[in-house]
Amino acid sequence: MESIFAFTALGVLLVLGMGAFGTAIGFGILGGKFLEGAARQPELAPMLQVKMFLVAGLIDAVTMIGIGFGMWFTFANPYVEAARALAG
């Protein structure tokens, strides 16, 4: 039973860590492209900023979904119930 908890914790840490890493890379690329586009055509900067914030929300939503899955596996782990059923 303890190994299930340990591997679940490692899996949740991987999900959260990779989600944070991917989000950081996504925000870095998004910000760089926004600055590049605003420098090329300053008159389009307000429109680009609105689109940048929309995409930033979508990028952040992916990480929030990962946090939801991580919390689900941490607090309502389906593998623990299956192991308890097998153990009797």
Image: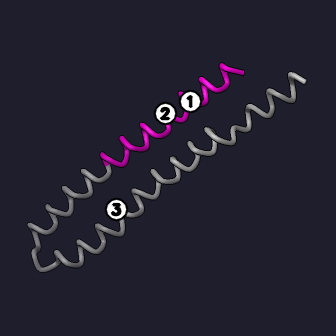
Mark 1 vs mark 3, foreground winner is 1
Determine whether 26 is above or below 79 in the image. Answer: below
Number of callouts in the render?
Answer: 3
Which residue is pictured at 82% across the width and 28% down the height? 84
Q: Which quarter of the figure is the C terminus placed in?
A: top right
Of helix, strand and loop, which one carries label 1?
helix
Q: Quadrant of residue 87?
A: top right
Percent position (x, y) of residue 16? Answer: 46, 40
Category of crowding for the residue at label 3, using alpha-carbon neighbours closer than 10 angstroms: few (below 14), some (14–19), many (at least 20): some
The residue located at (39%, 57%) in the rendering is: 59
Residue 20 colored magenta? yes
Task: Identify the residue position indicated by label 2 in the image.
Answer: 13
How far apart are the alpha carbons under marks 3 and 2?
23 Å
Question: In the visual, does 67 lie left or right of 36?
Answer: right
Q: Quadrant of residue 33?
A: bottom left
Amino acid at circle 3: Ala
Q: Residues within 10 Å of mark 1 (few under 14, many from 20)?
A: some
Q: Is residue 8 above or below residue 72?
A: above
From the image, tell me which residue sits under label 1: 9
Q: Amino acid at mark 1?
A: Ala
What segment carries the magenta color?
Answer: 1-25
Measured along the vertical axis of the image, is residue 60 above or below residue 3?
below
Contact flag, marks 3 and 2 (Cβ < 8 Å): no
